[in-house]
Image (tube, grey):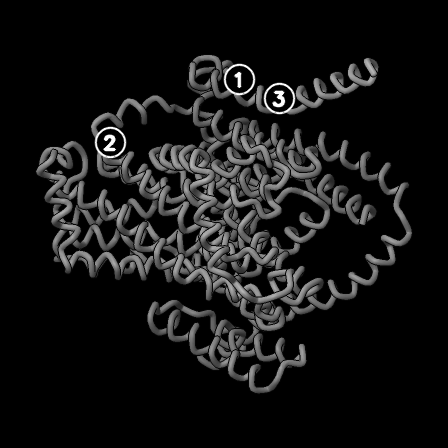
């Protein structure tokens, strides 16, 4: 956990340094305030990096094991998030509204009945409210977008 | 004045008017509950409906919708950790942890009653201050507004639960994020990476959705089965009554936050998000239980919701008294007034006093009706927090997608929300304050704008020119120095006591 915190702090520090260099090219009025904010962030991030390095030397091994166990669960939900975005990109808004609950429920070993009812309810609710009543242009997705064009 | 007041009451208690008001409240609550359906967009959609209507009925209908949106938004914020409305984001900070502790009923009651009383407070201020509002509005120039924003960010960062350094880091990073896009002063494009999507800056809703909702989904998937992490699914009326009692117990906090909300509402261009976070910062800074904030402290919910609803009275004040809309929703209400043949400004007090009173009473009545509906629905709604995680996770993900997409019907916003979700989760597990990040992100634009205006017009010593700014500066320094000084004094007292023993 402490090692993770160190890496995260380091990433923030690198991003801040990159932003500091980017700021140099802006006109004076556009860079005064960002310079103050980024300067403050960099000073504090350097202090925090040192704090993290000192803390990482005191890390307890059992915390690492626990972290590995949780890592697998994180990976699963992370993959779900990526899958959701892919689903949205390919199947569009309505496709995701119908398929996401169905797939998630089925893979979580919920009953067929619940999976189908919840998916259909979500689809109906979102379509009637946003598609029909509010006439919101729902993203069709690349798959249905190709068919409709 | 009395005649106008009586006419206002007669207007409001007309059965047709009551029907419109009730309809407005129901629409407002539904719009608030559903992320992605914004109050402003709804007002814009419904604007053509009011053309040709009786002006009092039409305006009351629109005011009722707008006044109750935040009460609906608070419900989603508390139950699912998703901001139902952008301006109810800060309610998540303590409302959602309360729901996780099985206190959703109490949190919902806190939010509904605090919203109602805040709304009434704002309406009363509106009625009382219309004739004398001008000097108050004019007293706040750019140095004062700059200092107010700096004070808000500093206090929230300083009172962060664990690492103060990390909180100030996120404060600075939030400010930087708010600077992305086109700079109005120079026309420069900052930190866009040449990507057109960022030219207009980073949108608030995807950031909020990501930072607050996605980490909760991840946590639910990794650790728990339900939102409420305690056993038992019974939500008792006792919890709801306790929630109502809480608000009256913290009546002074409610008054203070309503005052902050009203003042922020008066300042044109500063939205409800700012009001909420300022109130949250104030509540945390002044509370004896500051360390409980963010872990499910009812004071956090009361402060944010009372400030949020009180803001509407303030926003209406500038709209009616000067014709200056305090927020985007007020722009639409102002537009409706113009279309209906009512000219805001001094004429409101001379010619349309009956309509002015009608609006004040409508604001009060809508808040009361919405609050009663919210309280009655609190028990069944709170049971949702005991629903299985496997059912809630896909539904919450869909609401996040809808909320992010609904802002501007742009699929990129959804990707942004998920990206900020990942960042939010890392911030959460590594103790980087998301609250400070969010408040800085919200206020960053104002801080820079007022900083540059003050610097250009008054020079580097701009803070010392205005007495209000000086007072705010002293308060900030005292606030920041107060806690370490107290700690030092306590240590030296303990040492002396030990030596004495």
**Which is nearer the N-term, disc 2 or disc 1?**
2
Q: Mark 1 to mark 3: distance in Å?
A: 11 Å
Q: Mark 3 to mark 2: distance in Å?
A: 36 Å
Q: Mark 2 to mark 1: distance in Å?
A: 30 Å
Mark 1 or 3, which is nearer the eye? 3
Instruction: Tell me, for residue B482, which label it has, or none.
Output: 3
Q: Dots 2 and 1: beta carbons under 8 Å?
A: no
Same chain? Circles 2 and 1: yes
Q: Nearer the viewer, residue A146 or B234?
A: B234
Q: Residues within 10 Å of mark 2 (few under 14, many from 20)?
A: few
**What number of labels is visible?**
3
Mark 2 highlights which residue?
B128
Furthest-bottom residue in this view: A112
Q: Residue at x 89, y 48 (%)?
A: A60
Mark 2 or 1, which is nearer the eye? 2
Instruction: Tell me, for residue B425, which label it has, or none.
Output: none
Using the rendered image of the protein, determine whether residue B187 is visible from the camera's viewpoint: no
Instruction: Tell me, for residue B474, which label it has, or none.
Output: 1
Compared with B318, B410 (above or below) is below
Residue B368 position in % (x across, y down): 31, 51
Q: Chain of mark 1?
A: B
Same chain? Circles 1 and 3: yes
* Residue B308: quadrant of the picture: top left
**Which is nearer the N-term, disc 1 or disc 3?**
1
Residue B327 position in % (x across, y down): 34, 42
Residue B155 relative to residue B14: left or right:
right
Q: Residues within 10 Å of mark 1 (few under 14, many from 20)?
A: few
Q: Residue at x 48, y 16 (%)?
A: B470
Q: Dots 1 and 3: beta carbons under 8 Å?
A: no
Residue A61 position in % (x across, y down): 91, 52
Q: Secondary structure at mark 2?
A: helix
Using the rendered image of the protein, determine whether residue B335 is visible from the camera's viewpoint: yes
């Amino acid at each position: 956990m402490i090692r993770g915190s160190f890496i995260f702090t380091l990433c923030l520090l690198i991003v801040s340094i990159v932003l500091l260099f980017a700021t140099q090219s802006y006109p004076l009025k556009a860079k005064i305030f960002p310079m103050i904010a980024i300067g403050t962030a960099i000073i504090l991030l350097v202090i925090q990096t040192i704090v993290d390095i000192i803390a990482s030397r005191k890390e307890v091994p059992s915390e690492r094991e626990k972290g590995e166990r949780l890592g697998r669960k994180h990976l699963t939900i992370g993959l779900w998030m990526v899958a959701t975005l892919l689903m949205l990109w390919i199947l569009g808004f309505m496709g995701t509204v119908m398929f996401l609950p169905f797939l998630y429920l089925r893979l979580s070993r919920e009953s067929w009945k619940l999976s189908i009812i919840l998916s259909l309810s979500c689809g109906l609710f979102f379509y009637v409210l946003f598609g029909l009543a509010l006439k919101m242009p729902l993203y069709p997705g690349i798959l249905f977008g190709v068919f409709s064009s | 004045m009395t005649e106008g007041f009586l006419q206002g009451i007669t207007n409001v208690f007309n059965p047709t008017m009551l029907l419109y008001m009730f309809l407005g409240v129901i629409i407002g609550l539904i719009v608030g509950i559903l992320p992605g359906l914004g109050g402003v967009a709804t007002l814009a959609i419904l604007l053509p409906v009011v053309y040709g209507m009786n002006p009092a009925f039409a305006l009351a209908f629109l005011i009722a919708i707008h006044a109750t949106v935040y009460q609906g938004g608070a419900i989603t914020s508390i139950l699912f950790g998703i901001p139902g409305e952008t301006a109810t984001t800060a309610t998540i900070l303590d409302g959602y942890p309360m729901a996780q502790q099985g206190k959703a009923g109490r949190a919902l009651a806190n939010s509904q009653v605090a919203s109602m009383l805040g709304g009434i407070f704002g309406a009363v201020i509106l009625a009382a201050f219309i004739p004398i509002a001008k000097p108050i509005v004019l007293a706040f120039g750019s140095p004062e507004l700059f200092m107010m924003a700096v004070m808000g960010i500093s206090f929230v960062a300083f009172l962060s639960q664990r690492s103060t350094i990390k909180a100030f880091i996120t404060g600075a990073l939030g400010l930087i994020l708010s600077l992305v896009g086109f700079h109005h002063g120079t026309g420069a494009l900052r930190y866009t990476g040449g990507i057109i999507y960022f030219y207009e800056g980073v949108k608030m809703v995807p950031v909020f959705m990501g930072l607050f909702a996605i980490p909760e989904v991840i946590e639910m998937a990794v650790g728990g089965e339900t939102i409420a992490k305690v056993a038992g699914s019974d939500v008792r009326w006792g919890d709801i009554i306790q929630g109502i009692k809480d608000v009256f117990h913290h009546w002074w906090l409610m008054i203070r936050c309503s005052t902050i909300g009203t003042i922020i509402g008066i300042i044109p261009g500063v939205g409800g998000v700012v009001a909420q976070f300022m109130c949250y910062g104030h509540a945390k800074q002044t509370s004896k239980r500051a360390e409980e904030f963010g872990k499910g402290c009812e004071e956090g919910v009361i402060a944010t919701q009372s400030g949020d609803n009180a803001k509407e009275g303030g926003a209406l004040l500038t709209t009616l008294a000067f014709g200056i809309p305090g927020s985007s929703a007020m722009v639409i209400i102002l537009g409706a007034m113009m279309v209906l043949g009512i000219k805001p400004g001094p004429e409101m007090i001379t010619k349309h006093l009956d309509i002015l009173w009608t609006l004040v009473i409508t604001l009060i009545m809508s808040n009361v009706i919405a609050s009663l509906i919210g309280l009655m629905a609190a028990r069944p709604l709170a049971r949702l927090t005991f629903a299985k995680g496997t059912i809630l996770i896909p539904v919450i993900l869909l609401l996040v997608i809808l909320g992010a997409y609904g802002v501007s019907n742009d699929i990129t916003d959804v990707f942004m929300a998920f990206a900020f979700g990942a960042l939010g989760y890392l911030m959460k597990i590594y103790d980087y304050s998301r609250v400070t990040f969010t408040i800085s992100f919200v206020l960053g634009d104002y801080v820079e704008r007022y900083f540059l205006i003050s610097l250009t017009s008054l020079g580097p010593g701009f803070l010392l020119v205005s007495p209000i700014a000086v007072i705010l500066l002293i308060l900030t320094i005292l606030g920041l120095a107060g806690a370490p000084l107290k700690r030092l004094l306590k240590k030296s007292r303990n040492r002396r006591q030990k030596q004495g023993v």
